[in-house]
Image (cartoon, rainbow, N blue to C red):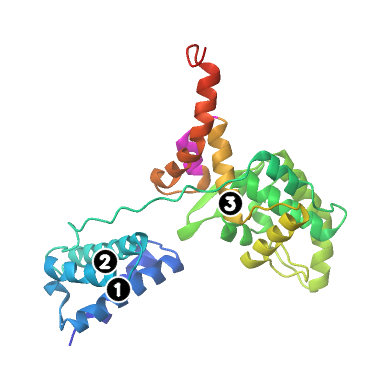
Amino acid sequence: MNNFTEYSEAFREYLQIEKNASPLTVKHYMEDLKRFFAFLDEEAVSRLEDVDHQLIRIYLTRLHDQHLGRRSVSRKISSLKSFYRYLERHNHVKDNPFIYVSMPKTDKAIPGFLYMEELEKLFEVNDLTDPLGQRNQALIETLYATGIRVSECQGMALSDIDFAIGTMFIKGKGNKERYMPFGRFAEIALETYINDGRETLLKKAGSTSDAVFLNARGGSLTARGINTILDKMVEKAAMTVHVHPHKLRHTFATHLLNEGADMRTVQELLGHENLSSTQIYTHVTKDRLRHVYMNSHPRAKE
């Protein structure tokens, strides 16, 4: 009888309690382990310590035969590497057989972003005399002003906003917390909505709520609802681009870097744990760098 289930459950607790991993991250780890354990059963391997490099090569071949993308394979290797690192640290295995397995190189997609002219169209479509129009204006101003994730926006409470010093308290991925500054345009839009439109929406619910962004019935706005609102704003603006909350996050980061913000500051504002996650935005700023160089260097052009 194997000990797969026992160790995977212990690893789940480790991810949740010690690593403070998000539920989605834990889910992906468990799915990767379940697939690997099924492979071990097929190979009649009953002990985790019996996994060696030859067996791993067979497993990678199986993944390749399933036509999985490089990103997906890389994630599975990373999950198993972390799992065995945990087993090794707790003396359940003598060594980590995945430690020398190289990750397939993945092509990082360059994030799409909006130009200021496109953003201006979205800022102009909302009816600011209407409660939903005020909410939509506050929503898009907040997403662009802060670059927060849709989950962070959805979970924001009134008590998280400090208008006196112009900051928001953001609860990020893995329960990581940060303070996020916001500017005058977002401040005006939020104050208008909170003091007027939000009160009207709240009366429809017949109950109290601390959620900042409410739906038309006065309940808390969902991530799906936020995407729908942005789709309708794009339609009103007669734009052909697709706009989603993460694209506004990309836009926030790109515009900051284009205007001279340093990478470390942008990393902190985005709530990225690793600088490598932020460095992808350097790809979209190269055109801007070339433009500045060509117009600034004395011998860049005749």
Q: Residue at x 22, y 71 (%)?
A: 59
Q: Is residue 282 magenta?
A: no
Which mark, by number, is residue 80? 2
Question: Callout 3 environment at 10 Å: few (<14), some (14 to 19), or many (20+)?
Answer: some
Return the disc, 1 or 2, that comes first in the chain's sequence. Answer: 1
Q: Whole-percent x and y of residue 175?
A: 48, 59
Q: Could you tell me the amino acid type at mark 2?
A: Leu
Residue that mark 1 sits on: 33
**Real-space Cα separation, disc 2 to disc 3, in angstroms:** 31 Å
Q: Secondary structure at mark 1?
A: helix
Q: Whole-percent x and y of residue 34?
A: 31, 77
Q: Which residues are magenta?
A: 260-268
Q: Residue at x 55, y 33 (%)?
A: 258
Return the disc, 2 or 3, that comes first in the chain's sequence. Answer: 2
232 w.r.t. 26: above or below: above
* In this view, the mark in front (1 or 3): 3
**Real-space Cα separation, disc 1 to disc 2, in angstroms:** 7 Å
Q: Could you tell me the amino acid type at mark 3?
A: Lys
292 w.r.t. 176: above or below: above
Q: Secondary structure at mark 3?
A: helix
Q: Find out whether the residues at labels 1 and 2 contact each other: C-beta distance under 8 Å.
A: yes
Image label count: 3
